[in-house]
Amino acid sequence: MSLREGPLNELRPSRGWLAAAAVAAAALIAAAIFFSARKGPSAAPSPWRSRFDSVIGPVEEVVSAPAHWVRLGAGAVGDYILAGSQNAALRARLVQARADEDQLAALRDENARLRALLGLRTDPPLPLVSARTVIDARGPFAHTRLADVGSALGVEEGNPVLSDHGLVGRIAGVAPQMSRILLLTDPVSRVPVIVAGADARAILAGDGSDAPRLDYAHGAAPLRAGERVYTSGDGGVIPRGLPVGATVKALDGWRVALDSDAAPIDFVRILLFHDFSQVAGGEPPAPSSAPSLRTAPPTQAPTAAVQGPASAAAPSPSPANGRAPARPRLPAPQLHGAPR
Amino acid sequence: MSATEVISRLDPTRWLLRPSLFCLAASLAFAAPLEVVGLRLPEPAFAFVPAFAWAVIRPSASAPFLLLGLGLFQDLLTGGPLGLWPLGLLTAHALTLSARRALAGQSALTLFAAYAAIVLIALGVAALALWIARGAAPGLADLFWQVVSTLALFVFAGRLIGAFEDADVRFR
């Protein structure tokens, strides 16, 4: 005799009640997981995340391969169509570059002599690792990417990540072969920056939009549109002087148009920056013959290879105590060469 | 419909497991970093399809835990706060379950209206949870595009409901 036909039939809960109880139990588990997680980066490192990224990274690498081919194909078609106009523009730039070359050599020589006179110490180069991104999370709740290098190549949580054009974000979770990049546009991303023209410090706050907000901006002069924004190095997580973007005036205040938006972020470079002892000379990285970010443009860089060193910090002197000066005057450091 | 056919159609592998695997595969495919001429792939929340359809088809004690798993997978895939997507999906499932009697046998247009309202409420709950727990609001533009692309998935929810809702008239 089944339970439904027996004397306990009335006590048997209906399927609807069972389903409701299951929903309540699952919701309780979800809420416990959500509210027990530590505050901070959305991709807070945990063993679960590391294991998941280790497993899903290679899978997604295969899944996203057609996407890379499509992008390369579209780029090739675009280059072919625009070859004539690009050639003319490049010729014009070459003429200008030749004119600037002599002036650059003279200024470099003068700069070196002045540095020698003042006894300034230049920041040592930082090693870096090139990587390809295999996952692009761009929903309303998280803006992250998964890069195909990890702790096996020295990547650590907090390492800044750059594209060809500027800062992309920082490492928020690491597995042996994979690392999670928290983008500047993520709703929980906060990066201290400096606006060069206005000599102002601010916090670059991601809010899911393409242009993060400039919060708590205060400086010697009022902000103006188009002023260059660099990392300030405050807090010691990211070195000073990495290019971030330019200020733009929005309806709700000042925002930053990111340099990294200039091109798709397929390939990135991860600066192996631990703390300011590196740029203060306490822990010089091993020298390498590989080209640097600012000195020589590499023509081709393999994925997931240690590329360094990169002179990433601002050219202003680094105090021995690791603190940034009160009002550093930052020239505009340029990233040259795209390791693709 | 024969009893054998009913049992076959109610096989959990068919109405629970297959849609779950579809969601996982689709989420992986749409997480690819494809960007052509500045345009990127939309990022719909595929798991809203089963969250809505399962509740309309029949009440199940397994479905909420599958949604919990799908949500955690989505959190891990996107690198978002762990537990956020399960909260949104379970909200949608609970709302649909509570309105199940009213939704049963309704036209596709009515079901779509209910689906749209439930997706909006569930994403609103997730956004509120993110704001309360992390003090961060989600990106409105991203939220808008995710809502639009998720609403487009109603086609699949409708097909799932159509395939199974008459499988067992005890739950009508």
Image (spheres, coloured by chain):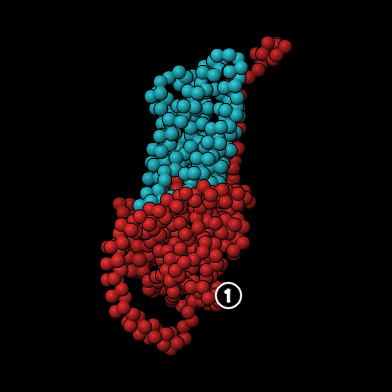
Chain colours: A red, B cyan
Residue B163 x, y percent position in the rendering: 50, 23
Image quadrant assignment for residue A100? bottom left
Foreground pick, A243 / A277:
A243
**What residue sits 47% from the left and 23% below the top?**
B162
Q: A22 above or below A9? A: below
Is residue A143 among the parts visible in the rendering?
no
**What residue sits 35% from the left and 55% below the top?**
A77
For badge 1, the amino acid type reads: Ala
In the rendered structure, the answer to whether residue A4 lies left or right of residue A146 reads right
Residue furthest to the right in view is A1
In the rendered structure, the answer to whether residue A221 lies left or right of residue B3 reads left
Residue A329 x, y percent position in the rendering: 38, 74
Find disc 1 in the rendering and name its residue.
A286
In the rendered structure, the answer to whether residue A110 lies left or right of residue B15 reads left
Task: Check the picture and name the quadrant holding the N terminus of chain B.
Answer: top right
Foreground pick, B122 / B9:
B9
**What residue sits 39% from the left and 38% below the top?**
B148
Q: Residues within 10 Å of mark 1 (few under 14, many from 20)?
A: few
Foreground pick, A21 / A294:
A294
**What residue sits 39% from the left and 27% below the top?**
B113
Q: A110 above or below A332? A: below
Residue A337 x, y percent position in the rendering: 42, 68
Image quadrant assignment for residue A21? top right
Host chain of mark 1: A
Is residue B31 among the parts visible in the rendering?
yes
